[in-house]
Amino acid sequence: MRKHLLEVDDLTPDDVDTLFATAAEMHDVQRRAVKKLPALRGRTVINLFFEDSTRTRSSFEIAGKWLSADTINITGKGSSASKGESLRDTVLTIAAMGVDALVVRHGASGAARRISEWVDASVINAGDGTHEHPTQALLDAYTLTRRLGELGDRHVVLVGDLTHSRVFRSNVRLLRMLGARVTVVAPPTLMPSGVDAWSARDGFATSWDLDAVLPTADAVMMLRVQRERMTGGFFPTAREYTVGYGLTRDRLALLGDTVPVLHPGPMNRGLEIAADAADAAQSLVLDQVSAGVAVRMSVLYHLLAGETA
Ligand code: NCD
């Protein structure tokens, strides 16, 4: 494994196998009454979050704690960043305290890479703007693999606000690395510019027609409509979005009751995913969350414990 995990391209297929094997062991630890392992005792992990987060931040914190690392959370709003301190000064200040890993979420694409150039600590990208979110892709693929087995030739359909989604960018790369067939579906206004060249290079399909694609899906991942990143009107009304691209009760019926449904969260219930779909037996939404802790334990372990642990 490389020192940092900034994007999916930092990983080889062998790294992913190793991470998944360790994550499976960590998943077993999660089911024990006493969850602590001593692997990262004496190591310090700082979560540096300049954007809101529920599951990513808490699952990195729990993952660090269950490995016995000292974990601390710093958020943009409660830190000196709100007093005008530059990102570089904030990061150098924290690094000067002697940290082993920085888990970073930031609104600017490329922020995690910049930070990795300033510090000696390992940097894990927990979401940078619309760029990447590699641990989300790892936990999604891990969850899918546990449900479907090997992903080779499985057809995974990603639906939603692709323009603003770092989850989509990381997922497409990882799913293709694992041999899945991938189709991404969005209204024309939320299909990223340049997607045709990209889909030709990475070998995934694009569509504007969800109803045509759904019957061929082995798994469906719904992505959040990211209103906070939208500067203009990307669709006329929420109702129109749901009619064209929501996983509604009718579309769930079209899908059948065995095809898994995923969503990285947070969900806009009633917009991109109906309550019936979010709460269906085939929904893996909460499995994704618990897999997230195991996968992040695995990532922290492999980045920090090294071969001597
Ligand atoms: C995603 C994110 O923040 O990129 N959420 C997450 O990490 N689980 C997706 C989103 O915000 O829609």
Image (cartoon, rainbow, N blue to C red):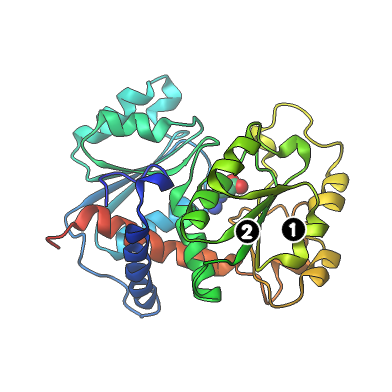
Residue corresponding to mark 1: 273
Task: Name above or below for residue 97 compared with residue 210.
Answer: above
Residue corresponding to mark 2: 263
Task: Name above or below for residue 173 compared with residue 38.
Answer: above
Which of the 4 quarters of the picture holds residue 211? bottom right
Circle 2 crowding by C-alpha within 10 Å: few under 14, some 14–19, many from 20:
many
Q: Position of residue 180 (x, y in %)?
A: 55, 61
Task: Name above or below for residue 283 compared with residue 176.
Answer: below
Q: Name which residue type carries label 2.
A: His
CA gap between label 2 and label 1 equals 9 Å
Q: Is residue 298 visible?
A: yes
Q: Name which residue type carries label 1.
A: Ile
Q: Earlier in the sequence, mark 2 or mark 1?
A: 2
Residue 128 horizontal side relative to residue 283, left or right:
left
Residue 197 horizontal side relative to residue 301, left or right:
right
Q: Give the structural element (helix, strand or loop) at label 1.
A: loop
Which of the 4 quarters of the picture holds residue 246? bottom right
Q: Is residue 63 visible?
A: no
Q: Give the structural element (helix, strand or loop) at label 2.
A: loop
Q: Position of residue 143 (x, y in %)?
A: 51, 68
**Residues at discs 2 and 1 in contact (Cβ within 8 Å):** yes
Residue 144 horizontal side relative to residue 32, left or right:
right
Q: Position of residue 190 (x, y in %)?
A: 72, 38
Name the residue located 27 percent from the left edge and 28 percent from the top edge.
118
Circle 1 crowding by C-alpha within 10 Å: few under 14, some 14–19, many from 20:
many
Q: Position of residue 227 (x, y in %)?
A: 70, 38
Q: Looking at the figure, which quarter contains the C terminus? A: bottom left
Residue 241 horizontal side relative to residue 73, left or right:
right
